[in-house]
Amino acid sequence: MGALPKKKISRRRRDNRRGADARSLVQLTTCPNCRRPALPHQACHSCGQYRGRQVLQVEAPAAG
């Protein structure tokens, strides 16, 4: 026999806890340099800039 709760958890308390389990859509921002969608607080994968500085070396896409 395992551990048993001392009191019943109310529906409000239970549902408040379960409300944090819901997934939300990823919020995208616009890169101020290349105007493409990018994740907030991360370097842009298209141009490699973060807060006005070049932090990633981005290769040009292969043509064709």
Image (cartoon, rainbow, N blue to C red):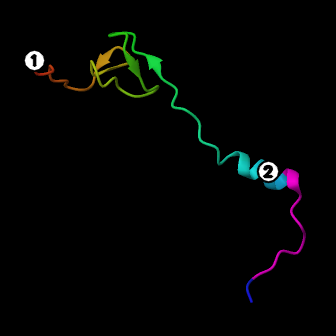
Nearer to us in this view, 30 or 61: 61
Q: Is 48 included in the stretch rendered in magenta?
A: no
Q: CA distance from mark 1 to mark 2?
A: 52 Å
Q: Position of residue 45 (x, y in %)?
A: 30, 25
Secondary structure at badge 1 equals loop
The quadrant in which residue 43 appears is top left
Comparing 9 with 53, the one in front is 9
Q: Which mark is residue 43?
A: none
Residue range in magenta is 3-12
Q: Quadrant of the C terminus?
A: top left
Location of mark 2 (residue): 15
Name the residue located 73 percent from the left edge and 85 percent from the top edge: 2
The vertical placement of 53 against 25, above or below, is above
Give SS at disc 2.
Answer: helix
Question: Based on the displayed image, in which of its 4 quarters is residue 42 positioned?
Answer: top left
- Crowding around mark 1 (Cα neighbors within 10 Å: few <14, some 14 to 19, many 20+) is few
Residue 63, numbered label:
1
| Residue under the point 89% across and 58% down | 10
Q: Is residue 37 above or below residue 14?
A: above
Where is residue 25 drawn, in percent x and y?
55, 32
**First along the sequence among labels 1 and 2:** 2
5 lies left or right of 30? right
Please indicate whether residue 54 sits to the left or right of residue 9 in the image.
left
Type of the residue with mark 2: Asp
Q: Where the N terminus falls, by quadrant?
A: bottom right
